[in-house]
Amino acid sequence: MKALELLDPASAHVLGFEWLTAALAPVSSYGDRHFSELRPFVAGEESQAQERAQAIARLAAGLDAERLDALHAAFGDLPDAAGAVARASLGDVLDDPNFLELRRFSATVERIDGLLAELTEWAPVSNDSVRAIQAALAPGGRDETGFYLADAFDAELAALRDGLGREQAALDAARGRENERAANALAREAIEGDEFIIMRAEIDRALPAGIRVLREAPTYLLCSLEYGEASLAALARRDAAAEAVAHAEERVRAALSALVRDQAAAIGDAERRLGELDVSLAAARFTRRYGCTPAEIANEPALAFERGRFLPLEADLSAAGRPFVPLDLELHDVAVLTGPNMGGKSVSLQTCGFVALCAAFGLPVPAARARTALFDQIAWLGTGREAQIGGLLSSFAREVLELKAILTRAAPRLLILADEFARTTTPHEGKALLIALLQRLHERRACGMLATHLAGIAGAAGARHFAVRGLAGIPRRPPSEDVVEALAALAEAMDYTIGEVTGDERPRADAIALTALLGIDRELVDAAYRSLSQ
């Protein structure tokens, strides 16, 4: 998949684009080629994006897990016949390994069509040309492990091979007679092999006619039989017959190659359809595995979902035996998100970006219900970005330059996800910058969310305010002082859901509670609580 201008490299990394690409990877070379050319849908292509997601969802619903696995295996077995077809198109004569690839290709296509036979929406991949290749190459073997240019391919070839067999038998008979005469002359029952040894003690006169000395040693002679006139004539006839067979085989291979050349365009169509189908099946497996559903694609900048999930983190949590808490959210502008440390603000932003990213590629999204625009840019700002600029700049200066790049591009439909922007400057100036940024983004009709610890920003900017609900109670510090146990206690006590805040913000002490949970002494923690109350 190509992110193109939808994501810059740092935003792609934070929002799990590489994870998504790996999760959707097809298994055949045809799928790889099609997958590498996928691009996000853009404004004006809302119906195409929604239709693709719905088609993938129907494919996932129409195939049970066993059938999907069987198709996955079939595409994994699918040989890449594109090289053989290209060679034939250029006029080359194909060899037996090429014909094996084409025979396996056509047989696997038939197997794939059989597995999809009940889905009327998906027309068979095979066409008259693929079936013609399959029928033409069928005599070449009974299984998929090899290919042989059998006599059944051509009657003249079969007759010439019969003639070659007779000439080989005549040559073997002539040589047998010569071998027998030489053996009798040497008082042996037979002469074994092309080369044989005669001990000097065995002979008291010249060697019999037809025996040639290859090497002499003090005690023996290494010899071979020479062809006599009868054998030489039989050899000439055998070689002529073998040459005729070779010419016939080349003629048959040329005829089969010409058939492939004539059907190349239609075979290419089947290859393209295989690529599309492999990519769609990978997306269907993804949809079934992660419980995804097609989003409604909106024409205006908006993002809303129920029970949305950030799948890369959900997969990591599942491996650790921990659940991911699904999120509900509705955005039609740029809002403010507050909440405690480790309360899931960053994950909330990542969930927004991941849902929009899936929809941009026409995929069902990880949510029970969703509605989103096709954004021109999904931009992540703040914590989590890899430093893309030289190390001489402060973290705040890098953030400013990143923001400048986002604002300069002026994408008509912008989804901006800012995590603690301006956190490294003074709270007073950071608050002023965030208020000004919210106002600018409101003028741009952007959509998104700015997560911050600073209070009063939403009210000052006239923006909607959301908050992670935070600690439902103060978790007990584990007796062992083990950090892993402390984090487990924190997760158990934390409410990661998001709610919209109306009215004045109430001060919370979740950060102080977290400090106590992680082992800071009680005296310091109590002092912090007293200071907060004042």
Image: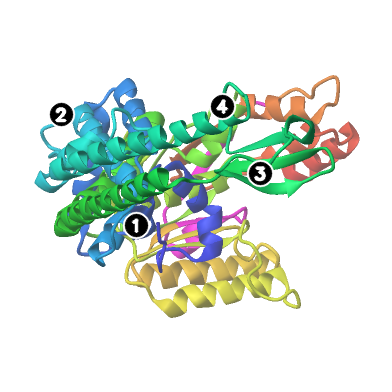
Distance Cα–Cα, label 4 vs label 1: 58 Å
**Of the residues under marks 2 and 3, which one precedes in the sequence?**
2
Instruction: Find residue 398 and report its horizontal and vertical position in percent.
Output: 65, 73
Q: Is residue 24 magenta?
A: no
Q: Earlier in the sequence, mark 2 or mark 1?
A: 1
Pointer 2 with pointer 4, Cβ within 8 A:
no
> How much space separates mark 2 and mark 4, taking CA atoms?
72 Å
Question: In the displayed structure, would residue 343 be above or below residue 387?
Answer: above
Q: What element carries label 3?
A: loop
Q: How crowded is mark 1: few (under 14 residues within 10 Å), some or many (20 or more)?
A: few
Q: Distance between the residues labelled 3 and 1?
A: 56 Å
Q: Which of marks 3 and 1 is in front?
A: 1
Q: Is there a contact, CB below 8 Å, between mark 4 and mark 3?
A: no
Q: Mark 1 points at which residue?
A: 83
- Residue at numbered disc 4: 184
Mark 4: which amino acid?
Asn
**Residue annotated with mark 2:** 117
Question: What numbered label is drawn on residue 341?
Answer: 3
Bounds of the magenta segment: 449-473
Q: Which of marks 4 and 3 is in front?
A: 4
Residue 11 in sight: yes
Coloration mode: rainbow
Estimate the spatial distance between the alpha carbons at disc 2 and disc 3, rounded to whole Å.
Answer: 53 Å
Residue type (three-letter) at the residue carrying disc 3: Asn
Give the residue at x 35% y 60%.
37
Q: What element carries label 1?
A: helix
Give residue 530's quadrant in the image: top right
**Residue 451 is inside the magenta segment:** yes
Q: How far apart are marks 4 and 3 (CA)?
A: 103 Å
**Front residue of 346 and 519:** 346
Q: Which residue lies furthest to the front in this view?
A: 205
